Image (tube, coloured by chain):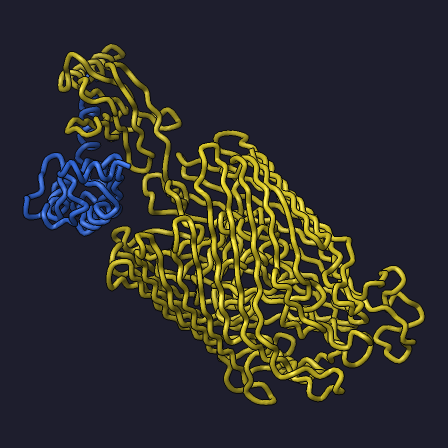
Amino acid sequence: MKKTILTVVVLFVAAFSYAQEKNKKLSFDVDGVCEMCKERIEKAALGVKGVKFATWDIPSHQLSLIMDERKTDVMKIKTAIVAVGHDTKELKATDEAYNTVHPCCKYRDDKVKDDHKN
Amino acid sequence: MKTQKIKFVGAYLFFCGFVVFSQDKVEGTVKDANQMGLPGASVYWMNSQLGVVTNEKGAFSIPFTKEYTSLIISYVGFESDTLIINEPKTIAHLLKPSNELREVVVQQKRDALEKSFFTPQNVVTINSEELLKAACCNLSESFETNPAIDVNFSDALTGTKQIQMLGLTSPYLMITQENLPMVRGASQTYGLTFTPGTWVESIQITKGAGSVVNGYESISGQINTELVKPLTDTSVFVNGYANQNGRLELNTHFNKKLTDKLSTGIYIHGNKRSQKEDANDDGFLDAPLADQINIMNRWQYQNAEKGWIGFLNVRFLNDEKQVGQVDFNPLTDRVDNNPAFGENNNNSLSGDQVWGSEIDTRRFDTSLKLGYVFPELPFQSMGLQASYSLHKQDSYFGFNQYNIDHESLYTNLLFNSIIGDTRNTFKTGLTFAYDGYQEVVNSTIFSRADTSAGAFFEYSYDNIEKVSLTAGIRADTHNRLGTFVTPRFHIRYTPWELGSLRGSFGRGKRAANIFAENQQFFASSRQLQILDTDGDIYGLQPEDAWNYGVSFLQGFIFLERKGNVTVDFYKTDFKNQIVVDWENPDEIAFYNLNGKSYASSLQVEVNHEILPNLQLRAAYKYYDVTTDYRSGSLQKPLQAQNRYFANLGYQTTLKDNGAQWRFDYTLHTQGKQRLPGTASNPIAYQLPEFAAPYSLMNAQITKVFSPAFEVYLGGENLSDVTQKNPILGADNPFGSNFDTNIVFAPIMGRMFYAGFRFKI
């Protein structure tokens, strides 16, 4: 009895965490400062096949996504975002990619950050 | 068994705790409004790399250091919250859902008149701030500060203003209220005066073919009105208005939030004019004696966790107008009430009768909107829109009688979702509509019932930056218009920064309600003629037109302040039109178009803040509206081909207590207008071929004392331009030359008004 319950629970937990969800919701941090960054980040995320919905919140720097886990994974999305010059927690954009963003989007620069504070 | 479970949970919690174990931490749970834990929500310190995700119960634990004080909690489909935390503690936080149906709240100062650089359609949004520039009074007068719409006088009696877009009058424009068809059928002529100005939250004007979602009837464009919402409108609002000519208006709004999810509002409007005005001494009232009571009750339901949203409206209207000669008394002078005269019996008039007219309208309408957003999929939603109205108008004009009863039902079922990702979206759905008409035109009864059913699909592509397009198609089957397909297409391309190039084409089809749309002709001695008999609608065929347009919008910065310039060109090409021919002064004839009919419009518009706080809007418009009449190809009568427009708005900087002055000035210049033929009249009743150009000026000053109270003072027609003899044959209204329709300039001269607004 104990065993069956434990097995069922373990199986359930496993199924819950490993199922490939069609509409998986997640959100993570992406660095950026402005409306223009928002456009660039969302466009890069949507450019990944399997990403259905992407919205980046300017004040919180959160990128919220809905994706089809059968077609993509988080790292693919992060790679695409880094490729257009925006940092994520695990992956940093190369200087080369970072330099392609518009001067007013240079989020690593404290002066640019301050400019966007108001 | 029970102990086993507790142990398991305990072990799990211990394990979780162990992972992020530290001396100081912030622990807690993130829940939705139903107290259900939200698994997978992000919790992180602002400006840090420190973040965690909640477990399946919505619980989290995050290390605390003195360095960070702002904790951000966010989750897809919910509003992100920032908590200020200065010590380690345990919190339970509720997140508010953000997936409200098609509503985006932008927290920044917006222009009173917005032009979008991104939508595929050429849409101008007028918000309530812009509407306050001309304080009066109802929807037909809301467009005076906007060059996209022309406001014209429809006749010399009723004081009704008619609106035009792209050179075509309102029947060719689809007018909707919250996307439900509104001013149509029996309400075509006076319907715009049935929406009080203070009820309006914003207006969206779409030039050119509209969306297929709202039906097939729009030809030159669409005007959608959003009314104030019980949830967001102020809880008490009072607006009082009075003008020099004795027009009094009172508007009150009362809104109440009953529960978190349910709000209701009662909106009451009344207007009255009992003062008789005859400044031009023609013996006729310059403006009608009028009385309107308009009451609306509105319910708004919003349950965003479950994804439901709903609106229910109920409205009653009673509108009475009396027009005609100053001495007219309806109780004794109404022709067919007077036993001495038979109906339409011209010969028995002794010559001392008084000419008058009354137009009484009663209307009930109700509408329901229900929307459902799939809580897990913010991009997918369903909606049901339904409306029902019963409209009764009883009227007589001298000895012409015209009554119309119109019962209308409209339902639209919609589904929105995406194809692949949110750059590719679609809307699809089904429409069903019923219109029952019963009309009495003198002694003839016309009745008809129209039913239609249709299906539509609209695809939109938006890659955010360069290109967006909307392609829609609908198929409808209608008992009089037949089975037909309506395609509509819009595209937008951004060639460079702040530039926006748009193109569109689309078809529109409709049944012309010739009497309801042209009822002002009853106030004349013209004989009504319908020259075709083989069609299904009063013997006429349905109207069918294509509209093509291009527009270019360029934003610019000049003198360090923003501005924009727009150039657009639209052409409406009629495949069939019901020609309203009044070139012969003795008759008005309706017939199917035989030949060509088109309306071309070119508009150039500049908006700029020329000095700090001083906004200039200037426009030039050119119209070429040509129709093949039986008597030949002619420009549309009473249509100025050249028009100029300028609006200046100045606002003082808002003080801390909310006080402000606002100044507004508008200039309209109309070029010469062709007048309909009067050559066969006796010389005394002949008019020149063209009416001379003239300019009109309006101005308004608003003093805002606080966010709760403001007063305004304004003047219309400041240059005091009037038409000398707006009524042809005013000396003998029962004679054969009587005509109240050739009106090309204001009848009323300079007029001042004042009012106040109070809100809490």
Q: Which residue: 78% across, 58% down? A: B276
Q: Which residue: 51% across, 29% down? A: B259
Q: Which residue: 56% across, 79% down? A: B636
Q: Which residue: 65% across, 58% down? A: B407
**Quarter assignment of residue B505:** bottom left
Where's residue B340, x and y in %?
Answer: 94, 71
Where's residue B274, x and y in %?
Answer: 77, 53
Indicate left or right for B262 with A25 as reference: right
Indicate left or right for B224 with B506 as reference: right
Along the viewing direction, whichever of B594 and B703 lies nearer the viewer: B703
Q: Which chain is yellow in the picture?
A: B
Indicate left or right for B328 with B43 as reference: right
Along the viewing direction, whichever of B737 and B132 lies nearer the viewer: B132
Indicate left or right for B506 with B334 as reference: left
Rendered colour, chain A: blue
**Quarter assignment of residue B268:** top right
Where's residue B296, x and y in %?
Answer: 62, 44
**Quarter assignment of residue B326:** bottom right
